[in-house]
Structures are given as C-alpha cells and as structure tokens.
Amino acid sequence: MAPRNYPGSFTVSSELRSELKRGNPIIAAWLTSASPLIAEAMASCGFNALIIDMEHGPIDEVSALTIFAAAERRGCPPLVRMPSADPYLARRLLDGGVQGLIIPCVENVAALDDFLRHCFYPPRGCRGTGLGRGNLWGDTFESHCTTFQPLIVPMIETCRGVAMAGAIAAHDAVDALFIGPYDLSADLGAPGDFSMEAYKNALSTTMDACRAAEKAPGIHQVAPVIDELRERLSEGYRFLAYGTDIIAMRRALSGLEGL
C-alpha cells in the first residue's frame, strides 16, 4: 500500500479502508510529542499510518500540519486522535490533509452522527469547501470533493460506549471501533488492570459488535512489546496502534539502574 500524490491525495483513506474490509491489519505508530522529526522517524519504520494524538500532549493545530507533511514525506498516512468531537477542528484538520479521524469517548450515536455531518461534503454532510492543503490548494478540488472520504474510527473508552458499541459500529460512516484500554479500565474502576473479568467482557462485547457490523475491531497496544502485538493480531484486532513515541524511547533507554 504505497500512498501517493501527497499532499492532496484523496485515495489513501480509501486504500486503508479497503485493507480493513479485506481483513488485513492496519498497524499505526502513535505520536504524542509535537516533533516533525520524531514523526518522520516513526513514519520510516514500516507502519501503515501515523496517529497524531491531539488529546494528550502538546500537539496543536499548527504543529499537526507540519507533522502531516513529515509523515507524508515517508509515505505514511496521517490520522488524528481528536481532543474532542469538535466539528470545526475536524473541518480544519481535513482541510489540512489528514486522512482519518479517531474520535474519543464515543457513547451516543446521535451525537456521533451530528459530528460526522461536518466531516463529509454535501450531499452526504455539511462540510464547507475551500482551497487548501487537502486538495492541493484547488488542483484536485473537484475530485477531492466527490471522492474523498476520511477514515472514521470512534473510540470505545467507557462502559456506556461498550453498551452502545453495536449501534456505533453499525453507523455507515464508521470503519473501525478503537478501544482505549487505559480509559476503559479506569471507567471500570481499576485503571490499568487488564486482567479483570469486566474488562475482558467489555473487549468481547466490542469485538462482537464489530463482527456483527463487519467493521474492523481496534485497540491500542500501548506497551511496545512485539509479542503482545502478535497476541492482539491473533485475537482478531485489525486496526492497531503500537506503542507511543515517548514510551518506546523510555523503554529503549531504561536499565541504567543495574549498571
């Protein structure tokens, strides 16, 4: 899957979507620092996409655009984990060339539907049109407006989200559901405890919802341990984030205490 024609490519999100529909995994890097250099380095490691986390950490809208360019330089599609379901931020990020949106803490289908109206051009939605980076400042305007559909990935991070997972997955614009393990375990009353039965049951419920709707199940494998990533794949997850930039760096540099 070789992304092309950056910026302004309106086919890359469709390529990612097609891979998921075929049951092939999408494995993304996860960036929390506002560094285009780190973004480009991560994008060069063979990931299918780079997720830019705008909820936790210092990444703002301006730095996100420079990160998009850095990831694209290495042929790695940029996706954004939104800080909230802010429709006007979504519009600006899409104008800037992001290929997909990961929406935090989705619990309500009606609210999700209202947000998604702003992510699609008419007649499907109400996204405004403009000449910007996402359509090569007008060079691909018509084809972009008629063809581009961002990857849409709601996050399941609460018990209420798990309860609504079936309805959320069934939304026609949704491509995958993405479990936030730390937030979900915290909402269940035991932050970071991934062994409790309630957490495992929540994962099963969400997985079943994805299978019923023929959507890709996703999860963040936060610890950068390749054997654990293999386990997530064997469990059936197909949209995965692996590690984070800071956690991977700290893991690589640990162990000085034993010297």
Image: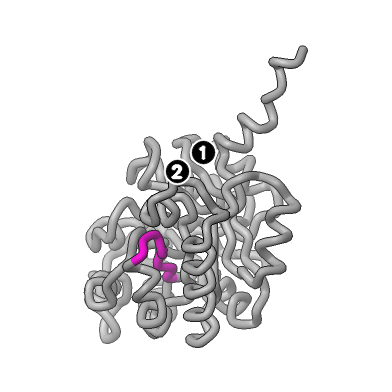
Magenta-colored segment: predominant secondary structure: strand
Residue 32 x/y as whole percent: 47, 40
**Secondary structure under the numbered disc 2 in the rendered image:** helix
In contact (CB < 8 Å): disc 1 and disc 2: yes
Report which residue position mark 2 lands on. Answer: 66
Q: Quadrant of the C terminus?
A: top right
Residue 156 x/y as whole percent: 41, 64
Which three-letter amino acid code belongs to the residue tagged 1?
A: Pro
Distance from Cα at disc 1 to Cα at disc 2:
6 Å
Residue 20 x/y as whole percent: 59, 76
The magenta span reads 152-159
Q: Quadrant of the N terminus?
A: bottom right
Name the colour scheme.
one colour
Magenta segment includes 195: no
62 or 172: which is nearer to us?
A: 172
Which three-letter amino acid code belongs to the residue tagged 2?
A: Thr
Write the residue at 71% across / 61% down. Answer: 231
Relative to 240, 125 lies left or right? left
240 or 33: which is nearer to us?
A: 240
